[in-house]
Amino acid sequence: MQLTRKSNEAPKVEKKTLGISRRQFMKHAGITSGGIAAVSFLGTGMMRKAQAKDVPHDVPTEIKRTVCSACAVGCGLYAEVQNGVWTGQEPAFDHPFNAGGHCAKGAALREHGHGEKRLKYPMKLVDGKWKKLSWEQAFNEVGDKMLDIRKESGPDSVYFMGSAKFSNEGCYMYRKLAAMWGTNNVDHSARICHSTTVAGVANTWGYGAQTNSFNDIQNANAIFFIGANPAEAHPVAMQHILIAKEKNNAKLIVVDPRFSRTAAHADLHCALRPGTDIPFIYGMLWHIFENGWEDKAFIQERVFEMETIRREAKKFPPKEVTHVTGCSEEEVYQAAKLMADNRPGTVIWCMGGTQHHVGNANTRAYCILQLALGNMGVSGGGTNIFRGHDNVQGATDLGLLFDNLPGYYGLTTGAWNHWTNVWNLDMEWMKGRFDQGTYLGREPMTTPGIPCSRWHDGVLEDKDKLAQKDNIQMAFFWGQSVNTETRQRDVRDALDKMDTVVVVDPFPTMAGVMHRRQNGVYLLPAATQFETEGSVSNSGRSQQWREKVIEPLFESKTDLEIMYRLSQKLGFAEQYTKRIAKDSKDMLVIEDITREINRGMWTIGMSGQSPERLKLHTQNWGTFSNKTLQAEGGPAKGETYGLPWPCWGTPEQKHPGTQILYDTSKHVKDGGGNFRARYGVEYKGDNLLAEGSFSKGSELTDGYPEFSAAMLKQLGWWDELTADEKAQAEGKNWKTDLSGGIVRVAIKHGCIPFGNAKARCIVWNFPDQAPVHREPLYTPRRDLVAKYPTYDDMQVHRLPTLYKTIQDRDMTAKYPLGLTSGRLVEYEGGGEESRSNPWLAELQQEMFVEINPGDAADRGIRNGDTVWLEGAEGGRIKLQAMVTPRVKPGVTWMPYHFAGVMHGESLAPNYPEGTVPYVIGESCNTAMTYGYDPVTQMQETKATLCQIEKA
Amino acid sequence: MATMKFLCDTKRCIECNGCVTACKNENDSALEWGIQRRRVVTINDGMPGEASLSVACMHCTDAPCQAVCPANCFYTTEDGLTLHNKDTCIGCGYCLYACPFGAPQFPKKGAFGSRGKMDKCTFCAGGPEENFSEAERQKYGSNRIAEGKLPMCAELCATKSLLAGDAEIISSIFRERVAYRGSKNAIWG
């Protein structure tokens, strides 16, 4: 049998597959087409009929404008609703991002309105059986458990895993919930997605976000992908990319260990060895400097310490680059030359770049490449960093992170002061919510928590090595698939060991079913984003207001309601919702939450996007250009779609949003900017501010520091504030002045509130000032370890972190194959939702590993064979072999969306009845290994080792 | 009347399968697990020269399926669409032999199982039953053509690779693309 990825062959009826037989597939298919079968085990009255088939064609149709919940492109669509049932989906040809286009996931979005496999009501595990609960019981039991644990182990023993699937309002309220509970043990999947980007990029030029927009890629003359495969991960982005290729003859360069579906459209594909991004970029820079292709004027005016990079790049002449990366000298030269000859060019990266133990340095290296070429702050240039989940940008912005409060304010006392001020709360009350102790010299309130990538270490690690009072005893898994985390065996042990596990999700997810517990697991059904409303930020920082399509299915509740009810149970609802109105059903008025976000988010200019403005944009999609994103007419004339931040000042100031960051050719009031003055004004006596470069119309015609009350006074602009503004702004800076007066006056004079500085090529507060190549912890190239070693072991925030200890062991004899992972277009994230969608599941029914024909032949493996793959730490998974030249000899690749099978054993019996996804399979992360970025605790999923044998 | 055609621009197709799930979504009532009226075929998979093409019934003008059908269940609409009648179809599979594109699909519950009627792309134009009737919906799926809309697969295509509609309009869209790209980047090459 030939294994093709998208087989349309008849499933073999008799063949047993991993955990679920083909016969069972057919059974499930029967349920899907029947629709009513599901009711039989649910009983009546508790589920809404959600079948389009039940609605006659001529019933009046309501049209809702909503946004796809798969990736962060943010595709719009029209949902058709009849009798409260989501019966149809129509393309939004007038939507500025996608012009009606969708990938497999977006085109199957309506299935959310069926939700056959979803959790239907709250449940708890009692002696190995799932038992139905009322919501009231659930809130009481979960809340009492939290309070008990708080009493014994302190607030830090409860972990709040959040989600990039929340609306902005949901993200914000979740972070606030954790804060008012009294812990920083809150995080979400951005940790294992783009945390290294946020850290690396923000520390280079100010903000850690995509600098341009998807649409702006249409203006590029070269497009450089490194560790990105938009054809599968962000398919609608390809619409813009292929337009650039067609109309500008833009050159596409793909740097990826695999010949990906994106590479199939490229002019040049460089198959580097996993984990050698930095040598590759230095190799390109070597040619750029050698040939004088760098943008000297740009560097002189706007870049700090390119000299260090020049020295570093010298260490990577073509021969060495080829030796380390495996790419030919010609390929690296061509990559550099194509980028130099075709400006402006854009650089696009995703998980292939970020998910490394040197991830932060990778992202800085990519930025430095763009700085050298002078491609920043221009249309068609920039670093277009594609975010993963639909609202992971928003979740990051709103501080759903272990080391931040909303708006990247950090966790300093100043940051807490700012937010308690926004919340109208007393700082002493806020402090009192936290553990007052000191652990390993750290105080919980101002110390980053335990990261999403390693919550299980927070459960399993020796208590004395943790910088908090006690281990994690209880965790919420609120919209997070734990199968996306490496070291699945430890994840399972941690789930087993905790006192209580609470899953809040539309689906049971792995946290609910992969453990070996008999008791103490709660499953609370959350509604999807189509059953509520709120704003969502796409990768390009544009915000969109999602209309509610249908009422919550079954007994699901919205995220916001669950959070609010919990806060009521826990006794801080009054503080939690102090500035937020409640409606007649005692539900939070969501627009008030958006307004509170606006009130506090000065740092990134998420202050001007009022709910009214966002709704206006949603209602007027067609007035925004698909090419420029600007409204050429209509009620939002002159504004950029979704008011991408920074959208300076208050909503009344009507800032149009900033599509392209750091663009000096525009006035700040029209979305112009420059690099941010974030790291002081000088370093070791050298000036960090821009030299002779400033944004159009700026009255300060050189670099300048960030604005504060004191600076306004120095400049003689203080009296331009109103009396009220003066009162609020006194002693504050642009980030903490809630009146917005400082921002307003700065902009009036054409100045950017955050100052005007150079981008920096060295980050003195990071372990490596300039990016340094370090071999992966599990490297197949032992000969390079001495020259390019990893770090020494270190304590990162609350957890000890290993580096050298792991790299010192040579595992290559037992595990000779390189192993990396990635995405499939049909599935998303942990895949629980998309594998429960029959239209998608049908297209990808088997977990597989790609292996080169040579490596397969050496092992006697034929295409389609069942194989055992063993990771370098001993995790074993059983899956199918796909023998393909897509991967080079010595490299193997797996998709990461599967779960529901572990060590060859099906977890299907652990699911509540009727919730097993259509497709289950081994999680690749059972075989994935240790490795964390020292700055952000990003996990290493892209460079490890394995062995494969025929099963 | 129009002459309806599909065209898949291989230089734009990224094998995202949006067209496949769009079809499933729109014609859900008539389809079952295993029936895919549209699918994406990839050549040179995983190596330089890889190209993908979305394929379904091409609605041939002189349709071979129609020519060979012993039960005479095919008919051509005034828009040039080749449709068939599931009530008269005998499920023999002869059309599958004749079709150059592998468009005819058969239920997957065993070879030619209990419901052996052939199924294929209708260009989202339903079937011989009354427009929007329950019978049409159950047997053929949606009828977008009667609503004045084009097939869902092309309407939702991520990169505007798959085009559907009047042949003349499609060809003018495609001609403009080729003018930018140069002829050697037309479809193949």
Image (cartoon, rainbow, N blue to C red):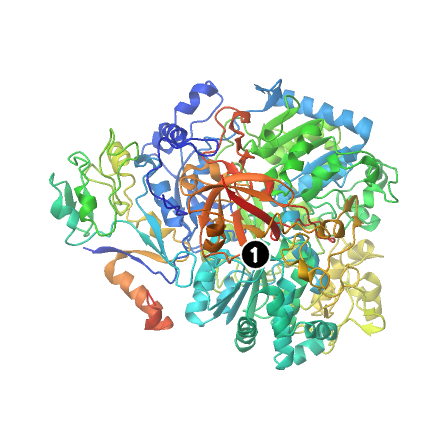
Q: Mark 1 — on which chain does it sit?
A: A
Helix, strand or loop under label 1: loop
| Image x and y of residue A860, in percent | 46, 47
State left or right for residue A298 relative to residue A239.
right
| Image x and y of residue A597, in percent | 67, 47
Badge 1: how crowded within 10 Å, few (<14), some, or many (20+)? many
Q: Which residue is mark 1?
A: A386
* Whether residue A578 can be seen here: no
Q: Nearer the viewer, residue A547 or A584?
A: A547
Q: Residue at x 56, y 71 (%)?
A: A332
Q: Nearer the viewer, residue B106 or B46?
A: B46
| Image x and y of residue A710, in percent | 84, 63
In this rendering, is residue A533 above or below A645? above
* Whether residue A223 can be seen here: yes
Q: Residue furthest bottom?
A: A292
Q: Residue at x 15, y 43 (%)?
A: B74
Q: Nearer the viewer, residue A931 or A564?
A: A931
Q: Quadrant of residue A108?
A: top left
| Image x and y of residue A206, in percent | 70, 62
Q: Dividing the image into 4 quarters, which one contains the N terminus of chain A?
A: top left
In this rendering, is residue B2 above or below A204? above
State left or right for residue A770 relative to residue A907.
right
Q: Nearer the viewer, residue A288 or A417?
A: A288
The number of numbered discs placed on residues in the rendered structure image is 1
In this rendering, is residue A118 above or below A663? above
In this rendering, is residue A542 above or below A243? above
Q: Name the residue type under label 1.
A: Phe
